Amino acid sequence: MTESGRMHNESFDSLAKEKTPAGVSRRSFVKLSGAGALGIVGASLLGACGPAAQGTSSTSTGSSSGPNASSGTLGDGKTLRVGMEAAYAPYNWQVSAASDYTIPIQNVSGQYADGYDVQFAKVIASALGMEPVAVKMSFSGLIDSLNNGQIDIILAGMTATDERRQAIDFSDPYFVGRFGLLVKSNSPYVGATSLADFTGAAVLGQKDTLLDTVIDEIPDVKHLTPVDSVPSQLSQLAQGTCDAITYNTENTNGFLRSNPDLVAIQFPEGKGFSQTIPVNAGIAKGQDAVLKKINEAIATVPEEERTKMFDAAVERQPA
């Protein structure tokens, strides 16, 4: 989730490894997520704009900050264009029918976005007096699209990292997730109770997310070249090309429901991954008044309600 974490289906189409301080608090994504569950390294990633969904119209362009930024309003002050993958459950995913939980996907005709991110998009849009719509794109293109004015805000199971903060501003976290490992049910690691039990194991993560960088916390790990998506992680694990894959623990039930031949390894306090997955909203720099309103909106949702929202998203997410 959290990354992100990027779980979450997790955060897709990432381009470069992400660096975060140890103990950083997505999923996370999710989705690490993840996704989830998601760092920017260098100009190559900042210049990589994610493609619009196949068969869709392109999004509008223009400065995201605009003339209303100083007054605490994003974009045109009416329609809040929310960037996300719509493929990173339980943070965000695509559905074909509207419901009380969904918002329209602007660039995919007749489709809607649901998920935990979407519920906070509603909260934030309401606080800003705007109507939210999702703009579906690859995870790696979100920051570039935000700075190009194609979207007004990122709500995509994204974690604020030092690298990303160089490009955009982030809200306070609206979720904090954690990491675990998935193994096959016949794996010799099924009984593992600490990261030390995975010493020497071949572990696979997802590119451009904490799901990859967190692997280095495992002693003497065989850190495999990361893949583009969580489905690719799952495929490689099923084929036996790795011993374990990283995942966002907040989506444990969803993963095991969809993959009954897998076992989720979660660790006791102090025995597992030290990094956590904060999930933050992102906006273009120079909009302090807007950021203050967003943080105030996030703060109105108590932790107990956030947990209920997340659990409900996990229950609704596609199998």
Image (cartoon, rainbow, N blue to C red):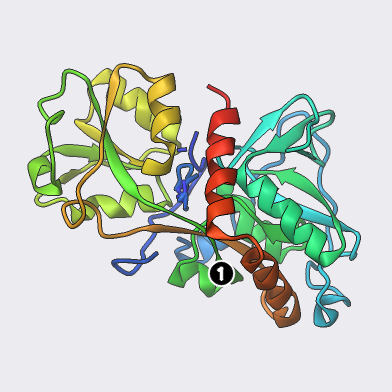
- Indicate left or right for 157 with 145 as reference: left
The residue located at (75%, 81%) in the rendering is 289
- Residue 217 horizontal/vertical position (percent): 20, 55
Q: How many marks?
A: 1
- Indicate left or right for 115 with 239 as reference: right
Residue placed under numbered mark 1 in the picture: 172
- Indicate left or right for 203 with 227 as reference: left
Q: Callout 1: helix, strand or loop?
A: strand
* Amino acid found under the numbered disc labelled 1: Asp
- Residue 314 horizontal/vertical position (percent): 53, 34
Q: 110 above or below 246?
A: above
The image quadrant of residue 68 is bottom right
- Residue 119 horizontal/vertical position (percent): 68, 47
Camera sees residue 88 = no
- Residue 88 horizontal/vertical position (percent): 55, 38
The residue located at (87%, 63%) in the rendering is 129
The residue located at (15%, 47%) in the rendering is 195
Camera sees residue 271 = yes
Q: 304 above or below 75?
A: above
Tell me if mark 1 has few (under 14), some (14-19) or many (20+) residues whose alpha carbon lies within 10 angstroms of its own: some
